[in-house]
Amino acid sequence: VCLGKLARTRLFSSFIGLLFGVAAFAQSSQSLELLSQADRGIIPRYLLQDPNGRSITSEDFNGRFQLISFGYTYCPDICPTTLVEMAEILKLLGDKAARIQAIFISVDPERDSGKVLKTYTEFFDARILGLTASPALVRRAADNFKIRYAKVQAPGADPAHYAVDHSAGMILLGPDGSCIQKFAFATPVVEITRQIEAYVDNH
């Protein structure tokens, strides 16, 4: 399955913006976001499916860290930015990246099939695993991780054409499956990498 012409155009347009935006993100004054009072209610559990339709749970990665983001393949800017950053984090970690499972969970299961997700995530880095499932299971996973999302559609527009407003950022789970930290969107990649590396070195 290949990205269609429209999808490729949308994706590469996002990258053009990234060329100008990444430098600004690197200068961002936003530091990493430790778990807030609300985020402490995160339940780091999910039951989803990988691109081959195999059931995947958070416990399948016990013994490894999990770096998780939620989004969707039609996202014009936030998701491509996040996955570029996730791929860069894996690159900067070097051999230590083997201790990390990077995961992208789609909040648009109606359009993001397993094959679509696989094509999308592999474009950024083959080590990023795309997960999806039925709308009910995706909603449950999002609720567990305190991720909000909702369809946004212009009045009278084609029902197939919609955006999904969703929470951004990345969440780090520890080797025991516990939620360690939440990184706010636009936290500099070098800072996220430094923090993850410190956690890896201490486990």
Image (cartoon, rainbow, N blue to C red):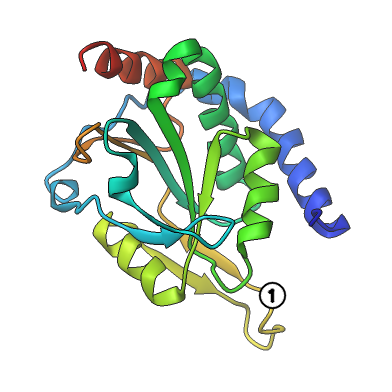
Q: Is residue 109 left or right of residue 172?
A: right
Nearer the observer, 100 or 124:
100
Q: Position of residue 58 (x, y in %)?
A: 31, 49
Q: Is residue 42 above or below residue 172?
A: below
Quarter of the view holding residue 15: top right
- Local packing at callout 1 (Cα closer than 10 Å; few below 14, some 14-19, many 20+) is few
Nearer the observer, 97 or 7:
97
- In the rendered view of the protein, which quadrant contains the N terminus? bottom right
Q: Position of residue 47 (x, y in %)?
A: 35, 61
Nearer the observer, 113 or 37:
113
Q: Is residue 31 left or right of residue 9?
A: left
Quarter of the view holding residue 173: top left
Q: Is residue 103 above or below residue 100?
A: below
Q: Position of residue 54 (x, y in %)?
A: 49, 59
Q: Which residue is mark 1?
A: 161
The type of residue carrying mark 1 is: His
Nearer the observer, 98 or 161:
98
Q: Is residue 24 above or below residue 118?
A: above
Q: Is residue 108 above or below residue 88?
A: below
Q: Position of residue 25 (x, y in %)?
A: 52, 25
Q: Residue at x 72, y 84 (%)?
A: 158
Q: Is residue 140 visible?
A: yes
Q: Residue at x 67, y 58 (%)?
A: 115
Q: Secondary structure at mark 1?
A: loop
Q: Residue at x 55, y 17 (%)?
A: 91
